[in-house]
Image (cartoon, rainbow, N blue to C red):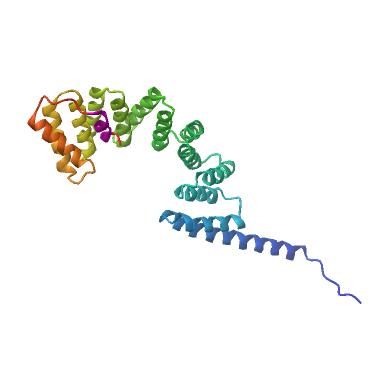
Amino acid sequence: MGIKYKSSPKGLGEFVTKTKRKFESAAYRQLIKAEVLKNSGCFKESIKHYLNSLFADRTNYKTYLGLGMAYKGEERFDKAIDALEKAKKLASYSTDVYFELGLCYLYSHKPTEAIECFKQAILLDRTNLNAQMQLAVAHEYIEEYDMAILIYHTIIESDPSYLGAYNHLAAIYMNFEEYKSAGTIFTQILKLNPEYAKAHLGMALCFDKMYQYSRALFYYKTYMEKKPHSRHGEKIKRRIEKLKNNKQTAPIKENFLKIAVE
């Protein structure tokens, strides 16, 4: 005589629902732990929790996004790209995914792929100046300087207070020995932020290269007042002494000039 079991489709449905909720809640708890660790800079520790979250739920693009960012923080860019590509498949509408993916491609020395990602991020959000900035950097990487310059000017027009765009633009002009144009950019920076020491150094180097030694001396001194412990301090102090003792001194060396664009 066997035991008869009563069929209960409703009971089975409830069991499946409860099990699903259990896994979803476990995934959520692990995701929260991972996010807290990642945001505090504990990338390695966060990765374990992201993976645990994915074990319970592989449908949340934010888990792949966070995992990719954690791998990026660990400089494991191949792993980061793999996670972010999966996030992209789940959320092709997310500008954050394309932006992070673009960064990882750029760090992996794959500027062409980076450019496509940054373009897509901008298409999704035309106000994303960070994506525009990195797009310009990627064009610099492949020596498309005209495009980079155009993008930096566009960023400045959109947000005149975005100092990063000024810095990169000035560095390009200095690399091409267009010191007057670079000086104009440094002047704009100082109007926005008179305490920005690097712009004072940039002005000094531009005037030095244009043989306007008195003005160069003024900006070198101003820079040292603002940055007395600069890692370039000894070089600059020697240059100041040379200019003070001989206003018709020889032009500065190119390797000295590079300190403004580092």
Q: Residue at x 65, y 60 (%)?
A: 20
- Number of numbered discs present? 0
Q: In the rendering, at what x and y percent does residue 146 appear?
A: 38, 22
Which corner quadrant of the image does residue 162 belong to? top left
The answer to whether 107 is drawn above or below residue 73 in the figure is: above
Residue 215 in view (yes/no): yes
Residue 196 in view (yes/no): no
Q: Is residue 34 left or right of residue 243?
A: right
Q: In the rendering, at what x and y percent does residue 139 appear?
A: 42, 28
| Most common secondary structure along the magenta stretch | helix
Which corner quadrant of the image does residue 107 belong to? top left
Of 157 and 112, nearer the camera is 112
Q: Residue at x 15, y 39 (%)?
A: 237
Q: In the rendering, at what x and y percent does residue 131 appear?
A: 42, 36
Q: Residue at x 42, y 54 (%)?
A: 39
Q: Residue furthest bottom?
A: 1
Q: Is residue 246 left or right of residue 204?
A: left
The answer to whether 148 is drawn above or below residue 73 in the figure is: above
Q: In the rendering, at what x and y percent does residue 14 appear?
A: 69, 63
**Extent of the magenta region:** 253-260
Q: Tell whether position 255 is magenta.
A: yes
Q: Tell whether position 140 is magenta.
A: no
Quarter in which the C terminus is drawn: top left
Quarter in which the N terminus is drawn: bottom right
Which corner quadrant of the image does residue 178 belong to? top left
Q: Residue at x 73, y 66 (%)?
A: 11
Q: Residue furthest left?
A: 245
Q: Is residue 255 left or right of residue 29?
A: left
Q: Is residue 204 left or right of residue 92?
A: left
